[in-house]
């Protein structure tokens, strides 16, 4: 009977990871949010970014678990000599003590320190950062988790989402890491035309966004050629650096055809071009009224 129960438990575990390993938007959003942090930790501590991300995804349910939401603990690390804030919940036993953090990024940093300072994980640091399979199996062998399929779960997630691509560090964006590290960043930072932007939410102002990225809201409004006190429309593009004089090279010879509701300003925002440059590219005066169907050069 005991063998039957164990077999059922393993089967249920396999079904669970299969459900988790299917691609879903929440997992991808989590990866987009924390990949730079994972790469930054890899550069500092030599822990594969793919392993850090996979553990974060698995342990926190892509940031949706009670432990992650209430305690910013993304790696399921229990107290064990911890003198900081704590959080209690049932796990292997009832009402177990878990570490609690001010931010999710503190959790990422502590995860690195936890592995690097733990004698039982010392052998893992002899492996290459590209050996994610060795790391996954080593974590299981060292007792990081009790689930018998823990290593397979990590490997499945890494391979499904191609997290191994981050182990080279090539996708690391120092600018994004700089402005997001140290707090839970509320926006997904996108990159286009050698610049960065976010999409405004309902009620956003240049002041509220500037506070998130730790820049002057006067400058942020200036980058977007707007008044510093303007209230933004939901869905607006907000550039985080000064816009450029034209669109990327692959737009050379291509035209943007004006759609209903567009203006020279919204088009300049769409391509990350300064408004005066858009007029200049098309030999238009500032008082020209564009019409639906007009073809505009953006480079």
Image: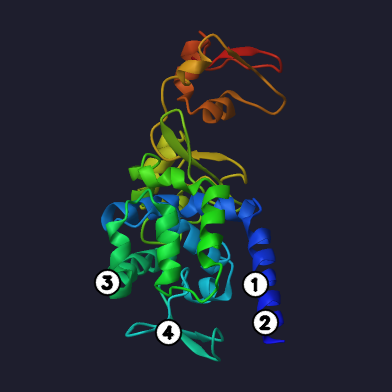
Q: Position of residue 76 (x, y in %)?
A: 47, 74
Separation of disc 3 and disc 2 at Cα? Answer: 37 Å
Pointers 3 and 1 in contact (CB under 8 A)?
Answer: no
Q: Secondary structure at mark 4?
A: strand
Q: Which mark is in front, 2 or 1?
A: 2
Q: Which residue corresponds to mark 2?
A: 3
Mark nearer the N terminus (3 vs 2): 2
Q: Which residue was labeled with disc 4?
A: 86
Q: Tag 1: Cα neighbours inside 10 Å, few (<14), some, or many (≥20)?
A: some
Q: Is residue 118 left or right of residue 235?
A: left
Image coordinates for residue 141, horizontal then vertical, percent: 42, 70
Q: Is disc 3 placed on a helix, strand or loop?
A: helix
Quarter that holds the N terminus = bottom right
Looking at the image, do the residues carrying marks 4 and 3 touch, with CB atoms under 8 Å apart? no
- In depth, the one of 26 and 247 nearer the eye is 26
Question: Is residue 110 positioned above or below 83 on the image?
Answer: above
Q: Residue sitting at 66 percent across and 19 percent down?
A: 258
Give the labeled residue for mark 1. Answer: 10
Counting residues from the start of the chain, the first of labels 3 and 1 encountered is 1
Q: Secondary structure at mark 1?
A: helix
Sequence-wise first label, 1 or 4: 1
Q: Which mark is residue 117?
A: 3
Name the N-terminal-most of marks 4 and 3: 4
Q: CA distance from mark 4 to mark 2?
A: 37 Å
The Cα atoms of the two marked residues, 2 and 1, are separated by: 11 Å
């Amino acid at each position: 009977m005991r063998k039957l129960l164990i077999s059922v438990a393993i089967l249920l575990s396999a079904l669970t990871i299969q459900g988790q390993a299917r691609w879903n938007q929440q997992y991808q959003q989590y990866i987009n949010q924390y990949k730079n942090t994972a790469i930054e930790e890899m550069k500092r501590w030599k822990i594969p970014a793919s392993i850090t991300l996979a553990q974060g995804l698995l342990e926190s349910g892509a940031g949706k678990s009670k432990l992650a939401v209430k305690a910013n603990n993304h790696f399921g690390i229990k107290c064990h000599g911890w003198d900081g804030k704590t959080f209690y919940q049932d796990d292997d036993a009832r009402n177990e003590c878990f570490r609690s953090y001010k931010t999710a990024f503190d959790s990422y940093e502590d995860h690195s320190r936890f592995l690097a300072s733990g004698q039982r994980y010392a052998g893992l640091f002899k492996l290459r950062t590209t050996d994610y399979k060795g790391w996954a199996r080593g974590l299981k062998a060292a007792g990081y988790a009790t689930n018998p399929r823990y290593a397979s779960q990590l490997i499945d997630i890494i391979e499904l989402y191609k997290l191994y691509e981050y182990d080279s560090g090539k996708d690391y964006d120092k600018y994004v890491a700089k402005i997001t590290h140290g707090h839970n960043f509320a926006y997904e930072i996108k990159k286009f035309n050698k610049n960065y932007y976010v999409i405004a939410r309902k009620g956003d102002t240049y002041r509220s966004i500037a506070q998130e990225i730790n820049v002057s809201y006067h400058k942020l409004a200036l980058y977007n050629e707007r008044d510093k006190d303007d209230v933004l429309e939901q869905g607006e593009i907000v550039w985080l650096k000064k816009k450029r004089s034209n669109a990327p090279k692959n737009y050379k010879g291509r035209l943007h055809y004006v759609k209903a509701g567009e203006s020279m300003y919204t088009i300049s925002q769409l391509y990350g071009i300064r408004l005066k440059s858009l007029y200049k590219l098309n030999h238009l005066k500032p008082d020209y009224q564009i019409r639906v169907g007009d073809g505009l050069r953006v480079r």
